[in-house]
Amino acid sequence: MSDLLQLSVAEAAARISARDLTAEEYFAAWQAAAESDELNAYLWSLTDADVYEVEQGPLGGVPVAVKDIFCTEGSPTTAGSRILEGYRPPYTATAVRLLDRAGARVLGKTNMDEFAMGSSNENSAYGPVLNPWDRGRVPGGSSGGSAAVVAGGLAPCAIGTDTGGSIRQPASLCGIVGLKPTYGAISRYGMIAFASSLDQCGPLTRDVTDAALMLAALQGRDPMDSTSVGIEGGIAAPSREDLSGLRFGVPVQLDGDAIDSGVREVFEATLKRIEELGGEIAEVSLPSSELGISAYYVLAPAEASSNLARYDGVRYGMRAEVDGDLTEMYEATRSAGFGPEVKRRIMLGTYALSSGYYDAYYGQAQKVRTRIAEDFIGAFSEVDFVVTPTSPSVAFGLGEKTDDPLAMYLNDFFTVPMSLAGIPAISIPAGLAEPEGGGTRLPVGFQVAAPAFAEQSLLEAAYALEQGIGFEREVAPLRPWNGGAA
Amino acid sequence: MIDRGQVLHVARLARLRLSDEEVDRMTEELSGILSHVDRIGQMDLEGVEPTAHVVALENVLRADEPRPSLPREKALEPAPEPVDGTFRVPSPQAAEA
C-alpha cells in the first residue's frame, strides 16, 4: 500500500504546497484506494476517466469523501434512499463548494442510513457498511460510510452530518475523530434536510489537526442559509500541549450501569490522563439530559415528517407508476420509496404533530430542550468542557439491534443532549476495549463538549488530549491500512 | 398506547400506504417508543419557554435585489415526467369510483 496514504491531510497539503508531492500523484493513490472498497462504504466514486484539475488552497490536492446527503451537481445523490435513486442534483451544497474552493476534490459519495436516520448504517437502501476493524460489526451511523472510509484507509478525510450523534458515534465506533460544530457554524444549504433545527455538517478525520483544517474551510455565514452564522475569528491549527487551568465536567447523571465495562475503563483512564496533563476533573449536573432521547425522538421525527413531505414523485426522484389519481400516486411512490425506519419516523412525527397531540408531544419536547440547554449553560459556568463516553458500547454486531428500534435509539444517549443544546462536541479515539462477551478489542471514543462557538478552545483541548493519549502512536498501527486488525 | 385505527389515520395523513403486516408492526413499535417518550409528559414544565431555535438570531435580512434563479430546464431535469416546461402529474380528480 502506498506510503502516501499514511500522510495526514495536514502533512499531505503541506507537501503539495511545497511542491514535494504532486496533487495528481496524491489523488491517484487515493482513487486507487477508493476503488478497492470492500466495505460497501462508497455509493459512488470518481472514476479514472474523470479529469482532475490541480487547485491551490489550504486543502489543495486533498481528496475528500462526502456523505451522500450533500447535493453534488451532476453526480448521484441518494441520501441512502430508493426514493432518490438516479437523482442528480442541479446544484451543489455550500459545504462541498467551500471544500472545493479550499482546493479539495470530491473523491466519492459515502453510504449512510436512509435520510440520516439510524445509528448503525443498516437502514441504507443500498446495504449496510462494514466496520473496517471487524467486518461482522456495524460502523455506526448515520455517517457510517464517511467513518468507514477514513478508518479503513479509503479516504484521507470525510464530511458527514450530525443530527443526534451521526458524526460522533460512527467516529467513535471506527476509531477516528468526528466533530459536530455548533448549530449554525456551517451552512446547511444543499444538505438534504432531516431535522432542520438539529442538522449540522462536520468533519471526520484521522486526527484533531485535520478536523481543524477542514472546519476552517467549512465554517462561515452563507447567504443561502439564513440560520448560518459562522465562527467569529475563524479556526486555526491547534497547538496546545497541556490542559493546565482547564476544568472538565463529568455529569453526575452518567449512569455507570448503562455503559459497557470496557468503555467505562477507557473513559476512566482518559479522565486520569486529563489530570496528568494538568486538567481538573469536576462533577457537573445535567438533570434534564436523561430526557434527551425522549425529547429528541419527538422533535427529530416531527421535523422529518414535515421535511420528507417533499418526496412525492413530482419534482425529483422516483415515481411509482399507478393507474389512479394524484393522491394514489403520492402514496404508492412514498410507500415504495421509503424504507422501514423512515416510515416509522414519518409516522411518529406525523402523530406527534397531529391535532390533539401537539402540546403533549412537540410543545413539551421543545420545553425539555430549553431545560437541557439551560443545564449546559449552568455547567459551563463551573467548567470549561463536559466529557462523556461517546457511545455506551463499542461497535455492535450487524443485525444485533435491528429488531428493536428503541434499543437502537438509546445508542444516542450521550450525543443527543449536545445536539438539542446546539453546542459543539468532538469524539476522539481514546483506546480499545473488548466488546461485552469478549472478542477482538475495538475502538472507544471520548466525547468533549464546549459552549456554543467555542470550537477553537474545544479543538485545542482535544489536540492536547490526543497527544497525551497517544492513540496515533499506540493504536493506529493496528488500523487496517497499517496491516493490523480485520 | 396507539391502536390500529390511529396508525391507519396517521398513515393517511402522511400519505403512506401500509400493508396489514406493516400496520401491525407499526402499532407495536410506535406504542413502545411512545411509552418511552411519554416520560416528558410527566415533567412539570409550566412557564418554561419552548426552544425552536438554539442560536439567538433575529431578522436575518438580505438586500432585496433581483438575481437569477435556477433555470427552468435545469429544475425540470430530475423530474419523473417533465412536459412543456412543467411537471406532469396524474389527475387530482379521483378516477371512476
Image (cartoon, coloured by chain):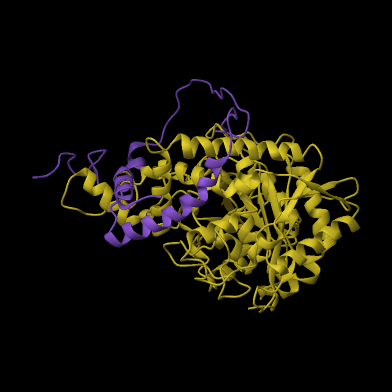
Chain colours: A yellow, B purple
Rendered location of residue A249, percent (x, y): 79, 48
Identify the residue shown where x is 81% and y is 61%.
Answer: A270
State the image quarter where residue A143 is shown: bottom right
Q: Is residue A453 visible?
A: no
Rendered location of residue A281, percent (x, y): 84, 51
Near-viewer residue (A374 or A443): A374
- State whether residue A375 is above or below residue A24: above
Q: In the orientation shown, which residue stands out farthest toward the top?
A: B64
Q: Is residue A116 visible?
A: yes
Near-viewer residue (A8 or B46): B46
- State whether residue A127 is above or below residue A194: below
Residue A193 located left or right of residue A28? left
State the image quarter where residue A258 is shown: bottom right
Identify the residue shown where x is 34% and y is 56%.
Answer: A337
Identify the residue shown where x is 63% and y is 78%.
Answer: A486
Residue A263 located left or right of residue A310? right
- State whether residue A17 is above or below residue A285: below
